[in-house]
Image: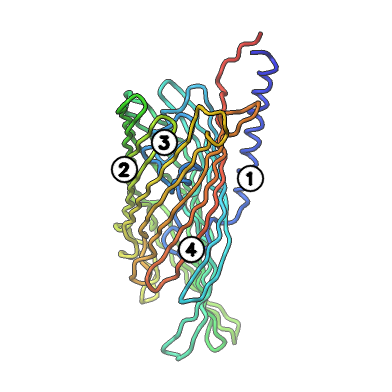
Amino acid sequence: MNFDRNNVQKMNRILCCLALMAMSTMGASAQSGTNSPYSQYGLGDLTDQGVGFNKAMSGVGLAFRKGNEVNPLNPASYSSVDSLSMIFDAGLSGQITNYDENGTTKSAKGGGFDYVTGLFRAFKNVGVNVGIMPYSNIGYNYSVSTRLKDLDTTVPVKYEGTGGVHQIFLGAGWKVLKPLSLGFNFAYIWGEYDRYVTSTNSSINILSRHYSASINSWKLDVGLQYDQPISKTDFITVGATFSPGHSLKSDPECDVISRNTSIGKSDTTSYVIHDALDIPTTWGVGLAYRHGVTLRIGADFQMQKWGSLSYPTINEKSEYVLMDGLLKDSYKLNAGAEWMPNPRSHKLLSHVRYRIGAGYTTPYYYINGQEGPKDFHVSLGFGIPIINMYNNRSILNISAQWQRRSADHLITENTFCFNIGLTFNERWFAKWKIE
């Protein structure tokens, strides 16, 4: 290899890093990833923990493993990384949501940063990944009218909330035996939320409640994959993950503020509940089949044990207390497939990864004693290879998803989401020979 090629490789690495930095900056400055009124419950809307190729298949990935992609859904997959590769993956998303309540409709736009990850081989049979992505999003602003029976009047009530929980993680995957790999992701999670409920009427006091909390804690995910060949080109892979639930050591607060508009006086009563927020124990299993590099099909099942956790709320006596029965166990079932027509062809379209998926998720909270909205979604996407004189290993991941959340007598949400991500796969550790 001559000296000019070596310089080209260095320039390629610099361009990749600059592109990732630009995407990260754009994501950090974007708006909250949700406008849903359902994000006022629990820790908010829980985000998809996958990357570009997972999203195109509705979040499937517990049993997927390939040496040219990052799959944080199961850290055991990191052990499959190519020994010469440094893989960066970054993505953004945007969505348009239509809300329907008893025939009244409204639309809202949103979007934001999804993830940035970097995967490389540290030792023989050991891959290491570093990444950052959201855990949950909170963002809503709406008003309703509530009738006060005692005063025989209707009061407008405004609900507003912002915030969310983020995570930065370090993970590793180790191929213990030829078919068996183990892995972990250890994350530092942090964030805060502010939620406001305000009722206003000219004939009564203005009453508002401000709920807030700050979170600084950790999260651990462990995983395994067993990759069994059934022929020279066909493999069956079983994947499993587990994340222990624990307290977030957070002390949520509630300020009840009463203002008398006639005399301009305000009274504030503050409540604090110590050690009142938790994340649940979570486990998942997945099964995948792959035929060479042309076809892979997978299905995942996951469960989160929210039902055993208490959650702070205002009770009937207007006291801010921990209460059982506000959260429920959540279940998720996803399936997806990827097909590449002909990897030996010289035509670009024959190297595109065509992806499709569908999924169903149950809610993790109750709303006024009723189960929250169920979630059904389908997705479609493409993995387009980036081919030029400098690069033939990187992928542009594009996908679209339609999501419907609905429950009896509650708001129905129809969301169209667009995701775009870049997987930079570079031979950073190759030793070029200078002539």
Given residues 123 and 218, the one toward you in this image is 123
Q: Earlier in the sequence, mark 2 or mark 3?
A: 2
Query: Could one spot residue 132 in this view of the protein?
Result: yes
Task: Specify the quadrant that holds the C terminus.
Answer: top right
- Mark identifier at residue 414: 4
- In the rendering, at what x and y percent does residue 28 appear? 60, 48
- In the rendering, at what x and y percent does residue 248 appear? 40, 51
Above or below: residue 221 compared with residue 379 = above
Answer left or right for 245 relative to 250: left
Q: Earlier in the sequence, mark 3 or mark 1?
A: 1
The 10 Å Cα crowd at callout 2, few under 14, some 14 to 19, many 20 or more, is many
For disc 3, the marked residue is 295
Q: Secondary structure at mark 1?
A: helix
Q: Earlier in the sequence, mark 3 or mark 4?
A: 3
Marks 3/4: CA distance? 31 Å
The amino acid marked with disc number 2 is Val
- In the rendering, at what x and y percent does residue 18 appear? 66, 36
The amino acid marked with disc number 4 is Asn
The 10 Å Cα crowd at callout 1, few under 14, some 14 to 19, many 20 or more, is few
The 10 Å Cα crowd at callout 3, few under 14, some 14 to 19, many 20 or more, is some
Q: Tell me what residue is drawn at x 44 percent, y 86 percent.
A: 148
The amino acid marked with disc number 1 is Thr
For disc 1, the marked residue is 25
Marks 4/2: CA distance? 28 Å
Of all residues shown, which one is farthest toward the top?
A: 435
Q: Tell me what residue is drawn at x 38 percent, y 58 percent.
A: 276
